[in-house]
Amino acid sequence: MATTATMNTALLTWENVYWLSQLLLVAFAGLALVSGRIVNNRQAAQSLTLQTELATARRKQAEAEKSLLELQQPVREPRTIDEQRAHEILDWGEKGSVEIFFSMLLARPIQALVFYFRPRCDCS
């Protein structure tokens, strides 16, 4: 029995404890490196996906801005009336009177023009 107690005491020396702690340190460091690599790969894939989605969103935004500018362009340009063409149209059509109605409710104009055409009555 004396030899077993001596063996247990020999296993718990400071040198053995130091060696075991160094072994555990290397094992945990390796585990940390492997798990870091796995997390890095996942983040790289996620970053690539997000960059692709961002590029797609920017392309769609650019297309939307372009179409908006195309829609705004006719509104920004000053409008002119071709008087000669207007006279031709008016001379060609039936003669009568026209009433133009424009309404503004709650400080917002209603963007509707209503034309009432009353042909002249040639009741002679």
Image (cartoon, helix red, strand yellow):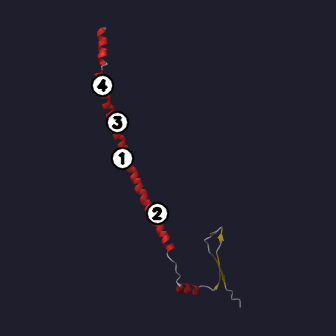
**Contact? badges 1 and 3 (CB < 8 Å):** no
Determine which of the numbered discs, if any, sits on residue 32 in the image.
Answer: 3
**Contact? badges 4 and 1 (CB < 8 Å):** no
Mark 4: amino acid:
Tyr
Element class at badge 1: helix
Q: Nearer the viewer, residue 68 or 10?
A: 10
> How many neighbours does mark 1 have within 10 angstroms: few (below 14), some (14-19), or many (20 or more)?
few
Q: Nearer the viewer, mark 3 or mark 2?
A: 3
Determine which of the numbered discs, if any, sits on residue 64 in the image.
Answer: 2
Determine which of the numbered discs, if any, sits on residue 44 in the image.
Answer: 1
In-image side of 85 versus 4 (left or right): right
Q: Nearer the viewer, mark 1 or mark 3?
A: 3
- Measured in 3D between alpha carbons, the distance from the residue under mark 1 to the one under mark 3, in whole angstroms, is 18 Å
Determine which of the numbered discs, if any, sits on residue 18 in the image.
Answer: 4
Mark 3: amino acid:
Ala
Residue sitting at 46 percent across and 63 percent down?
64
> Residue 78's spot in the image, x, y percent?
51, 77
To which quarter of the image does residue 98 belong?
Answer: bottom right
Mark 1: amino acid:
Ala
Dot 1 or dot 3, earlier in sequence? 3
In-image side of 54 versus 33 (left or right): right
> Residue 43's spot in the image, x, y percent?
38, 45
Q: Quadrant of the N terminus?
A: top left
Dot 4 or dot 2, earlier in sequence? 4
Dot 3 or dot 2, earlier in sequence? 3
**Contact? badges 3 and 2 (CB < 8 Å):** no
- Measured in 3D between alpha carbons, the distance from the residue under mark 3 to the one under mark 4, in whole angstroms, is 21 Å
